């Protein structure tokens, strides 16, 4: 096995494992809390697993192929979903700090 094949296989394992690890935590969190952010992250994880498996198993020789168009759209969608999920999860932690800071400034 050459280094290129080793890295390709390692990339597949790492990508699927990390998406699966996040998925097994965020989906139960969604079921428990019903927060949309957890559902969005779960969808992003599933989409990431599908993308990775397709990238490593489908062999196409024509760059203009429909697969590449769908692949790029899927990649952009996945990135947007991850961003929305993380931002939605962090917003509650940013709002109290902003309110607290504005109250401290008024008292000085």
Image (tube, grey):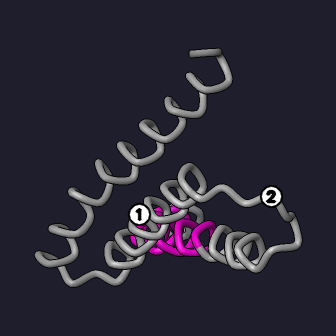
| Distance CA(mark 2)–CA(mark 1) | 27 Å
User: The N terminus is located in which quarter?
Assistant: top right
Q: Which residue is mark 2?
A: 61
Question: Image check: 35 left or right of 47?
Answer: left
Q: Is residue 91 magenta?
A: yes
Q: Which residues are magenta?
A: 78-101
Split into 4 quadrants, where in the image is the C terminus? bottom right
Q: Secondary structure at mark 2?
A: loop
Seen at 21% across and 57% down, the residue is 24
Of 45 and 84, which appears nearest the observer?
45
Residue assigned mark 1: 45
Q: How dense is the environment of label 2, judged by Cα within 10 Å: few (below 14), some, or many (20 and up)?
A: few
Kindly indicate the quadrant of the structure image that contains residue 79.
bottom right
Could you tell me residue 62's position as x and y percent? 85, 64
Q: Quadrant of residue 70?
A: bottom right
What main secondary structure does the magenta stretch of the protein show? helix
- Residue at 21% across, 84% down: 34
Left or right: where does residue 80 sit relative to residue 12?
Answer: right
């Amino acid at each position: 096995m050459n280094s290129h094949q080793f890295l390709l296989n390692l990339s597949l394992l790492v990508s699927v494992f990390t998406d699966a690890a996040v998925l097994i935590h965020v989906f139960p969190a969604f079921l428990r809390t019903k927060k949309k952010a957890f559902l969005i992250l779960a969808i992003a994880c599933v989409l990431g697993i599908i993308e990775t498996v397709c990238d490593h198993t489908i062999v196409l020789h024509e760059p203009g192929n429909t697969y590449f168009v769908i692949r790029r759209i899927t990649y952009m969608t996945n990135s947007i979903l991850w961003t929305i999920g993380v931002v939605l999860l962090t917003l509650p932690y940013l709002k109290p700090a902003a309110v607290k800071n504005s109250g401290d400034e008024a008292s000085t």
